Protein backbone atom coordinates (compact mmCIF):
# COMPACT_ATOMS: atom_id res chain seq x y z
CA UNK A 1 0.00 0.00 0.00
CA UNK A 2 1.80 3.14 -1.17
CA UNK A 3 1.25 5.48 1.72
CA UNK A 4 -2.47 4.92 1.68
CA UNK A 5 -3.42 3.75 5.13
CA UNK A 6 -3.93 5.69 8.32
CA UNK A 7 -0.86 6.76 10.32
CA UNK A 8 -1.91 7.61 13.90
CA UNK A 9 1.43 9.19 14.81
CA UNK A 10 1.64 11.44 11.75
CA UNK A 11 -2.03 12.30 12.09
CA UNK A 12 -1.56 13.36 15.74
CA UNK A 13 1.38 15.58 14.87
CA UNK A 14 -0.44 17.23 11.96
CA UNK A 15 -3.67 17.65 13.96
CA UNK A 16 -1.84 19.27 16.88
CA UNK A 17 -0.02 21.55 14.41
CA UNK A 18 -3.25 22.64 12.67
CA UNK A 19 -5.19 23.23 15.88
CA UNK A 20 -2.36 25.14 17.59
CA UNK A 21 -1.94 27.41 14.56
CA UNK A 22 -5.71 27.89 14.30
CA UNK A 23 -5.96 28.92 17.94
CA UNK A 24 -3.03 31.25 17.31
CA UNK A 25 -5.03 32.99 14.58
CA UNK A 26 -8.05 33.73 16.75
CA UNK A 27 -6.32 34.72 19.98
CA UNK A 28 -3.21 36.63 18.90
CA UNK A 29 -3.22 40.32 19.60
CA UNK A 30 -1.24 41.54 16.62
CA UNK A 31 -2.76 41.13 13.17
CA UNK A 32 0.62 40.27 11.65
CA UNK A 33 1.14 37.45 14.15
CA UNK A 34 -2.31 36.15 13.32
CA UNK A 35 -1.37 36.16 9.63
CA UNK A 36 1.84 34.21 10.26
CA UNK A 37 -0.11 31.74 12.37
CA UNK A 38 -2.61 31.41 9.53
CA UNK A 39 0.18 30.55 7.10
CA UNK A 40 1.33 27.77 9.43
CA UNK A 41 -2.24 26.50 9.71
CA UNK A 42 -2.54 26.35 5.90
CA UNK A 43 0.76 24.44 5.74
CA UNK A 44 -0.56 21.97 8.28
CA UNK A 45 -3.69 21.46 6.19
CA UNK A 46 -1.45 20.78 3.18
CA UNK A 47 0.33 18.10 5.24
CA UNK A 48 -3.06 16.62 6.15
CA UNK A 49 -3.95 16.43 2.46
CA UNK A 50 -0.65 14.72 1.74
CA UNK A 51 -1.36 12.24 4.57
CA UNK A 52 -4.68 11.47 2.91
CA UNK A 53 -2.93 10.40 -0.27
CA UNK A 54 -3.95 13.54 -2.13
CA UNK A 55 -0.71 15.02 -3.43
CA UNK A 56 -2.47 17.17 -6.01
CA UNK A 57 -4.49 18.97 -3.35
CA UNK A 58 -1.43 19.36 -1.11
CA UNK A 59 0.40 21.15 -3.93
CA UNK A 60 -2.63 23.28 -4.77
CA UNK A 61 -3.12 24.15 -1.11
CA UNK A 62 0.46 25.40 -0.85
CA UNK A 63 0.19 27.33 -4.13
CA UNK A 64 -3.18 28.98 -3.53
CA UNK A 65 -3.46 29.31 0.23
CA UNK A 66 0.13 29.56 1.47
CA UNK A 67 1.11 31.54 -1.63
CA UNK A 68 -1.70 33.64 -3.01
CA UNK A 69 -4.32 34.09 -0.28
CA UNK A 70 -1.72 34.83 2.42
CA UNK A 71 -0.14 37.47 0.21
CA UNK A 72 -3.52 39.09 -0.44
CA UNK A 73 -4.32 39.15 3.27
CA UNK A 74 -0.91 40.59 4.16
CA UNK A 75 -1.48 43.29 1.54
CA UNK A 76 -4.80 44.00 3.23
CA UNK A 77 -3.02 44.34 6.58
CA UNK A 78 -0.44 46.69 5.02
CA UNK A 79 -3.13 48.93 3.54
CA UNK A 80 -5.27 49.20 6.65
CA UNK A 81 -3.10 48.74 9.74
CA UNK A 82 -3.20 51.61 12.19
CA UNK A 83 -2.75 50.87 15.89
CA UNK A 84 -4.85 53.66 17.26
CA UNK A 85 -5.42 53.93 20.96
CA UNK A 86 -3.11 52.75 23.73
CA UNK A 87 -5.18 49.70 24.69
CA UNK A 88 -7.36 48.59 21.80
CA UNK A 89 -10.02 45.97 22.47
CA UNK A 90 -9.49 42.73 20.61
CA UNK A 91 -12.82 40.99 21.13
CA UNK A 92 -16.36 42.19 20.67
CA UNK A 93 -18.75 42.30 23.59
CA UNK A 94 -20.42 39.03 22.60
CA UNK A 95 -17.16 37.09 22.97
CA UNK A 96 -18.13 35.94 26.47
CA UNK A 97 -21.14 34.10 25.04
CA UNK A 98 -19.45 32.97 21.84
CA UNK A 99 -16.61 31.12 23.57
CA UNK A 100 -18.82 28.71 25.56
CA UNK A 101 -21.07 28.17 22.54
CA UNK A 102 -18.08 27.30 20.32
CA UNK A 103 -16.70 24.89 22.94
CA UNK A 104 -20.14 23.33 23.39
CA UNK A 105 -20.53 22.87 19.63
CA UNK A 106 -17.12 21.22 19.42
CA UNK A 107 -17.93 18.88 22.33
CA UNK A 108 -21.31 18.03 20.81
CA UNK A 109 -19.78 17.13 17.44
CA UNK A 110 -17.06 15.09 19.17
CA UNK A 111 -19.62 13.15 21.24
CA UNK A 112 -21.74 12.44 18.17
CA UNK A 113 -18.70 11.29 16.20
CA UNK A 114 -17.43 9.10 19.04
CA UNK A 115 -20.79 7.43 19.54
CA UNK A 116 -21.68 6.95 15.90
CA UNK A 117 -20.73 4.02 13.76
CA UNK A 118 -22.76 5.01 10.75
CA UNK A 119 -19.95 5.23 8.24
CA UNK A 120 -18.81 1.99 6.77
CA UNK A 121 -15.40 3.42 6.08
CA UNK A 122 -12.37 1.37 5.27
CA UNK A 123 -8.79 1.73 6.33
CA UNK A 124 -7.43 1.97 2.83
CA UNK A 125 -7.04 5.09 0.77
CA UNK A 126 -9.30 5.61 -2.18
CA UNK A 127 -8.26 8.97 -3.54
CA UNK A 128 -7.77 8.71 -7.29
CA UNK A 129 -4.53 9.53 -8.99
CA UNK A 130 -4.06 12.61 -11.13
CA UNK A 131 -5.38 10.81 -14.20
CA UNK A 132 -8.65 9.87 -12.50
CA UNK A 133 -9.15 13.38 -11.14
CA UNK A 134 -8.53 14.94 -14.55
CA UNK A 135 -10.90 12.50 -16.24
CA UNK A 136 -13.64 13.37 -13.76
CA UNK A 137 -12.97 17.10 -13.95
CA UNK A 138 -12.97 17.39 -17.73
CA UNK A 139 -15.83 15.00 -18.47
CA UNK A 140 -18.49 14.95 -15.82
CA UNK A 141 -17.68 18.27 -14.14
CA UNK A 142 -16.61 20.37 -17.10
CA UNK A 143 -19.57 22.74 -16.81
CA UNK A 144 -18.85 23.72 -13.16
CA UNK A 145 -15.22 24.04 -14.17
CA UNK A 146 -16.07 26.62 -16.84
CA UNK A 147 -18.57 28.33 -14.55
CA UNK A 148 -16.01 28.77 -11.80
CA UNK A 149 -13.70 30.60 -14.21
CA UNK A 150 -16.55 33.04 -14.80
CA UNK A 151 -16.88 33.50 -11.03
CA UNK A 152 -13.16 34.26 -10.81
CA UNK A 153 -13.45 36.85 -13.61
CA UNK A 154 -16.40 38.51 -11.87
CA UNK A 155 -14.52 38.56 -8.55
CA UNK A 156 -11.47 40.11 -10.23
CA UNK A 157 -13.51 42.90 -11.85
CA UNK A 158 -15.51 43.40 -8.67
CA UNK A 159 -12.42 43.70 -6.49
CA UNK A 160 -10.89 46.29 -8.83
CA UNK A 161 -14.12 48.32 -8.92
CA UNK A 162 -14.58 48.17 -5.14
CA UNK A 163 -11.03 49.02 -4.12
CA UNK A 164 -10.40 51.71 -6.75
CA UNK A 165 -10.00 55.26 -5.49
CA UNK A 166 -13.04 57.33 -6.30
CA UNK A 167 -11.54 60.23 -8.22
CA UNK A 168 -14.72 62.25 -8.75
CA UNK A 169 -15.94 60.57 -11.92
CA UNK B 1 -13.23 5.21 15.82
CA UNK B 2 -12.11 4.64 12.28
CA UNK B 3 -9.76 7.04 10.47
CA UNK B 4 -12.43 9.11 8.75
CA UNK B 5 -13.94 9.98 12.12
CA UNK B 6 -10.59 11.20 13.41
CA UNK B 7 -10.28 13.49 10.41
CA UNK B 8 -13.89 14.65 10.85
CA UNK B 9 -13.11 15.44 14.48
CA UNK B 10 -10.09 17.51 13.44
CA UNK B 11 -12.25 19.33 10.87
CA UNK B 12 -14.97 20.01 13.45
CA UNK B 13 -12.50 21.43 15.96
CA UNK B 14 -10.89 23.69 13.35
CA UNK B 15 -14.34 24.80 12.20
CA UNK B 16 -15.32 25.75 15.76
CA UNK B 17 -12.07 27.68 16.23
CA UNK B 18 -12.78 29.59 13.04
CA UNK B 19 -16.40 30.24 14.02
CA UNK B 20 -15.25 31.62 17.36
CA UNK B 21 -12.84 33.95 15.53
CA UNK B 22 -15.54 35.19 13.17
CA UNK B 23 -18.00 35.91 15.97
CA UNK B 24 -15.67 37.22 18.66
CA UNK B 25 -12.92 39.29 17.03
CA UNK B 26 -13.21 42.99 16.24
CA UNK B 27 -10.65 43.25 13.46
CA UNK B 28 -12.25 42.62 10.07
CA UNK B 29 -9.04 41.15 8.61
CA UNK B 30 -8.85 38.59 11.40
CA UNK B 31 -12.51 37.78 10.71
CA UNK B 32 -11.54 37.05 7.08
CA UNK B 33 -8.66 34.84 8.28
CA UNK B 34 -11.04 32.92 10.57
CA UNK B 35 -13.38 32.43 7.61
CA UNK B 36 -10.48 30.87 5.73
CA UNK B 37 -9.89 28.54 8.69
CA UNK B 38 -13.51 27.41 8.47
CA UNK B 39 -13.19 26.77 4.73
CA UNK B 40 -10.02 24.74 5.34
CA UNK B 41 -11.86 22.67 7.94
CA UNK B 42 -14.54 21.84 5.38
CA UNK B 43 -11.84 20.91 2.88
CA UNK B 44 -10.26 18.49 5.37
CA UNK B 45 -13.64 16.83 5.92
CA UNK B 46 -14.26 16.57 2.16
CA UNK B 47 -10.86 15.04 1.43
CA UNK B 48 -11.25 12.61 4.33
CA UNK B 49 -14.65 11.53 3.00
CA UNK B 50 -13.22 11.11 -0.50
CA UNK B 51 -10.31 9.12 0.83
CA UNK B 52 -11.99 6.75 3.24
CA UNK B 53 -15.64 6.36 2.16
CA UNK B 54 -16.06 4.30 -1.01
CA UNK B 55 -19.28 6.01 -2.12
CA UNK B 56 -17.57 9.41 -2.18
CA UNK B 57 -14.33 8.31 -3.80
CA UNK B 58 -12.92 10.81 -6.23
CA UNK B 59 -15.65 13.41 -5.90
CA UNK B 60 -14.22 15.04 -2.79
CA UNK B 61 -11.02 16.07 -4.53
CA UNK B 62 -13.02 17.91 -7.17
CA UNK B 63 -15.23 19.61 -4.62
CA UNK B 64 -12.15 20.80 -2.74
CA UNK B 65 -10.78 22.23 -5.99
CA UNK B 66 -13.96 24.23 -6.45
CA UNK B 67 -14.03 25.32 -2.80
CA UNK B 68 -10.45 26.60 -3.05
CA UNK B 69 -11.31 28.57 -6.20
CA UNK B 70 -14.37 30.16 -4.62
CA UNK B 71 -12.36 30.90 -1.47
CA UNK B 72 -9.80 32.79 -3.54
CA UNK B 73 -12.59 34.85 -5.12
CA UNK B 74 -14.18 35.43 -1.72
CA UNK B 75 -11.02 36.65 -0.01
CA UNK B 76 -10.29 39.03 -2.91
CA UNK B 77 -13.73 40.64 -2.85
CA UNK B 78 -13.82 40.64 0.95
CA UNK B 79 -10.54 42.48 1.28
CA UNK B 80 -11.60 44.94 -1.43
CA UNK B 81 -14.74 45.71 0.59
CA UNK B 82 -12.65 46.11 3.77
CA UNK B 83 -10.26 48.52 2.03
CA UNK B 84 -13.13 50.54 0.51
CA UNK B 85 -14.73 50.83 3.96
CA UNK B 86 -11.39 51.72 5.51
CA UNK B 87 -11.13 54.70 3.13
CA UNK B 88 -14.43 56.03 4.45
CA UNK B 89 -14.16 55.28 8.16
CA UNK B 90 -10.38 54.97 8.80
CA UNK B 91 -11.16 51.84 10.80
CA UNK B 92 -11.23 48.07 10.39
CA UNK B 93 -13.14 47.39 13.60
CA UNK B 94 -16.31 45.42 13.06
CA UNK B 95 -18.37 47.13 15.75
CA UNK B 96 -17.66 50.64 14.48
CA UNK B 97 -19.69 50.09 11.33
CA UNK B 98 -23.08 50.95 12.80
CA UNK B 99 -24.73 53.24 10.24
CA UNK B 100 -27.54 50.77 9.67
CA UNK B 101 -28.31 50.34 13.35
CA UNK B 102 -32.04 50.85 13.95
Image (spheres, coloured by chain):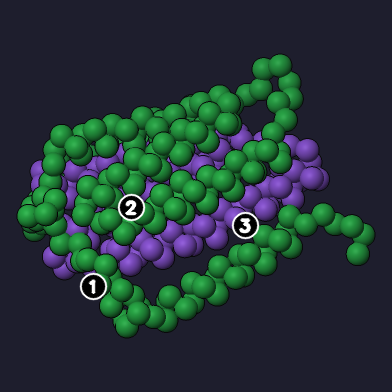
Q: What residue is at 55 percent from the left and 70 percent from the top?
A: A151
A81 sits left or right of A11 in the view: right
Q: What residue is at 33 percent from the left and 67 percent from the top?
A: B62
Which-is-in-front pick, marks 3 and 2?
A: 2
Residue A20 position (above or below residue A78):
above
Q: What residue is at 11 percent from the left and 50 percent from the top?
A: A5
Q: Which mark is drawn over residue B77?
A: 3
Is there one chain holding both mark 3 and mark 2?
no
* Residue hosting label 1: A132
CB under 8 Å between discs 1 and 3: no
SS assignment at label 3: helix
Screen quadrant of the C terminus of chain A: bottom right
Figure quadrant of residue B66: bottom left
* Residue hosting label 2: A58
Is there one chain holding both mark 1 and mark 2?
yes
SS assignment at label 1: helix
Residue B74 position (above or below residue B18):
below
Q: What residue is at 46 percent from the left and 39 percent from the top?
A: A39
Amino acid sequence: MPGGDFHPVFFSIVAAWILAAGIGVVVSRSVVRAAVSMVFCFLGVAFAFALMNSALLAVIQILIYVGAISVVIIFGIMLTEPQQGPKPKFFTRQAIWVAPIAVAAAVLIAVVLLSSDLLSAGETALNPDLRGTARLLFNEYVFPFELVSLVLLAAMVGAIVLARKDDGR
Amino acid sequence: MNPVEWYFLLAALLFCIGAFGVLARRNLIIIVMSLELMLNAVNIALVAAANFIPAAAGKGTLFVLFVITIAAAEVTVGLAIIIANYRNRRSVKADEYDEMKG
